[in-house]
Amino acid sequence: MQPFKTVDIAFGRGHLTVGLPEEAEVTVIRKASLPKLADQDGAVRAAFANPVDSAPLAELAKGRGSACILICDITRPVPNRLFLRPMIQTLAEAGIPKDRITVLVATGLHRPNEGAELAELVGDPWVLENVRVENHFAMRDEDHADLGRTATRNTPVRIDRRFLDADLRIATGLVEPHFMAGWSGGRKVVAPGVAGHETIRTFHSARFMEDPLAVQCNLVGNPLHEEQLEIVRMIGEIYALNTVIDEDRDLVHVTFGEIIASHLAAVGFIQDVTRIRLPQRFKTVITSSAGYPLDKTYYQTVKGMVTPLDILEPGGTLIIASECSEGMGSKEFRDAQARLVELGPERFLATLTAKSLAEVDEWQTEMQLKPMRIGRVQLYTSGLDEEERRITAVEVIADLDAAVADSIRRHGDSRVAVIPEGPYVVPVVEAA
């Protein structure tokens, strides 16, 4: 049977057209439409001038001798090109020398962003020409200061000295659903963004990862969020610029101010737009890894598998498309995936629960266990070799259209949910 209906989903720098059989009853799940900002530069400058729970940026900068601005790494499509130059110009006009302003890429435990990739990330040559732009390296113990441990959960707190030692500290980021911390942005750019490896590996240990409240769109009782709040309070004065973008990656909202308050303001703006309520679950769910840059690796693809689980009928089929143009991700993640295949899900999880410090990147493999517990996971990709496909531990498919038709036939249910933007949209089942 030839496809009768088509839906475009994000894939790489473009999209894939998915063909669905004639009998398919299709529910396309998107974020609610947000009005585009007529003047994005004006919106950024207005946020600086009208902050949340702080003085305007120009006033904050007066009398400061140095500044450190955190930006997310290449895995987040943050519109740095829109705000870095006006932010730096404001700091310089207030008297902070440009050679005392550092833009620090908050890599967490990801690889550094360098060369052409760094230029793409920053998005404005002027920034690279006028201030230092450097990467955070979580494994370099000497780069971090020890702040002790959190009082609540005894997390070791080590933070990059370049951020701690700055007179003015600013985090910048994108507010979107995060499958463990509830929402990205704000405090998350600090920890794990510029935290040492022990801090990050504690965050990603099984006692955090298996907590039922450590899920997307939830901040209440979320252990990761609560530890992040405690850490930023231990550090002291921090400000943040938080952005919200639409499906076209255009800026639709921006806040600036005290790090916790400005983040909550951005979450308040986006939460009802991103969290989409549905009256039913589906036996066939088609999603993406949100396209570039999130689908550069299989490591990041796992996020797209976890986010729609609330609407997947137990025993159903989750089909995800991800380019994986850079392959699996880190060597550590590859090793964790190989152990999953070798041991099986139950034995693999058993190896994690006794650890106080997770091994680097094995937490993403742990997160993959969640969709595997619920149903069948199928992956369509163009970027993995034969061995990489084997250690995904899921079923790799060659024909997306055929997989959809087969799922409908196998389950005897023509209802299909399609989530074109992947983990940037959080569908939930709520009875009417």
Image: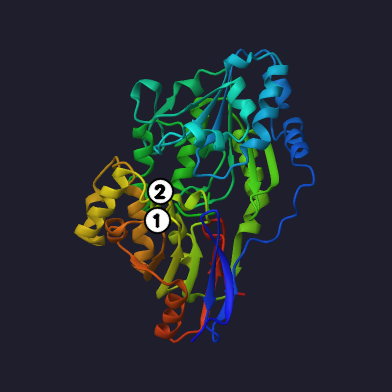
Query: Quick one: 50 or 83, which is closer to the camera?
Result: 83
Q: Is residue 45 left or right of residue 383?
A: right
- Image disc number at residue 326: 2
Q: What element carries label 1?
A: loop
Q: In this view, does 302 lie above or below 419?
A: above
Q: How many marks?
A: 2
Where in the figure is residue 120, as x and y percent of width and height? Answer: 56, 37
Please report contact status of discs 1 and 2: CB closer than 8 Å, yes or no: yes
- Image disc number at residue 428: none
Q: In this view, does 24 lie to the left or right of 205?
A: right
- The type of residue carrying mark 1 is Gly
Few, some or many C-alpha atoms within 10 Å of disc 1 (few <14, some 14-19, many ≥20)? some
Where in the figure is residue 304, as x and y percent of width and height? Answer: 47, 58
Q: Is mark 2 on a helix, strand or loop?
A: loop
Q: Is residue 183 above or below residue 58?
A: below
Where in the figure is residue 8, as x and y percent of width and height? Answer: 58, 67
* Residue underneath mark 1: 383
Q: In which quarter of the image is the C terminus?
A: bottom right
